[in-house]
């Protein structure tokens, strides 16, 4: 019912930036029999609390050498995607230019807002627009324009994308067709939907982005063991 992996991920996307790698190390996790995507968020919060405490206890010497600061993971606040955009737009007088995604500057401002207002280094941004999420992301039944998904920001940088996946066969096929995808191309994938898939969800966490923020680096390539 629960599985995780630590593995390289290859991304065919533009990566000539300070925050993208075409190959990065991802911590991936999926869990079944959830009541909602909040269960996934709670699991990730617990995992991060464990990791930061382990680093503090076992690697204090290395943290001092690297001048690394550990973020507070006591409680991570959450905010809806549309509400987050509105909050930073009003507080920092920044016009909303893209209603369907967060621009890097917006992520920074959201991180700044929740540090100033809540003293938190992390923030969950939930209910991303469906058009910006994969075909397997479950749409919000109360408003299908949004999904039961989230990003986790650390110091204003997205380090995780996660959420609840579609487990119903008819719902998954309908979303594929809506995106002009041929369900026949995903026959093996859809088999589990046909024969009994529990409500489930998971996340993928980018290791290098976490290291970058812990060490206060300016470029993610400095956090990669073997940057290409």
Image: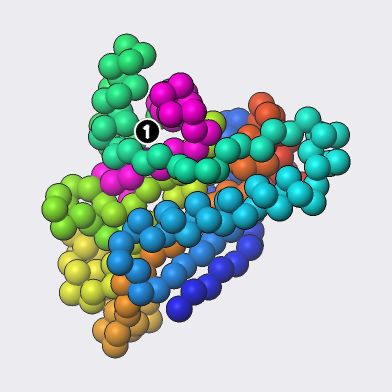
Residue 153 included in the magenta stretch of the image: no
Q: Which residue is mark 1?
A: 102
Q: Residue at x 36, y 41 (%)?
A: 78
Residue 36 horizontal/vertical position (percent): 30, 62
| Quadrant occupied by the N terminus | bottom left
| Quadrant occupied by the C terminus | top right
- Residue 23: in sight, yes or no? no
Which residues are the magenta region?
Answer: 106-134
Residue 134 horizontal/vertical position (percent): 34, 56
With 103 as the anchor, is 169 left or right in this view? left
Residue 112 included in the magenta stretch of the image: yes
Q: Quadrant of residue 217?
A: top right
Q: Quadrant of residue 186?
A: bottom left
Q: Nearer the viewer, residue 57 or 69?
A: 57
- Residue 82: in sight, yes or no? yes
With 31 as the anchor, is 20 left or right in this view? right
Q: Residue at x 34, y 22 (%)?
A: 88
Q: Residue at x 35, y 56 (%)?
A: 38
């Amino acid at each position: 019912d629960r599985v995780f992996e630590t593995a390289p991920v290859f991304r065919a996307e533009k990566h000539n930036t300070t925050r993208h790698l075409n190959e990065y190390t991802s911590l991936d996790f999926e869990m079944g029999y959830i009541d909602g995507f909040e269960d996934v968020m709670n699991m990730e919060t617990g995992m991060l609390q464990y990791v930061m405490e382990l680093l503090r206890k076992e690697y204090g010497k290395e943290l001092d050498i690297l001048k690394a600061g550990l973020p507070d993971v006591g409680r991570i606040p959450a905010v809806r995607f549309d509400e987050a955009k509105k909050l930073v737009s009003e507080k920092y007088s920044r016009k909303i230019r893209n209603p369907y995604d967060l621009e890097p500057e917006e992520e920074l401002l959201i991180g700044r807002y929740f540090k100033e207002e809540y003293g938190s280094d992390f923030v969950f941004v939930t209910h991303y627009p469906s058009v910006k999420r994969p075909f397997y992301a479950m749409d919000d039944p109360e408003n299908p324009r949004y999904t039961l998904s989230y990003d986790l920001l650390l110091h204003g940088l997205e380090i995780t994308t996660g959420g609840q996946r579609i487990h119903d066969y008819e719902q998954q096929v309908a979303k594929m067709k809506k995106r002009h995808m041929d369900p026949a191309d995903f026959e093996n994938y859809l088999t589990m939907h046909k024969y009994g898939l529990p409500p489930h969800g998971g996340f993928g966490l980018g290791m290098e982005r976490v290291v970058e923020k812990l060490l206060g680096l300016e470029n993610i390539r400095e956090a990669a063991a073997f940057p290409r």
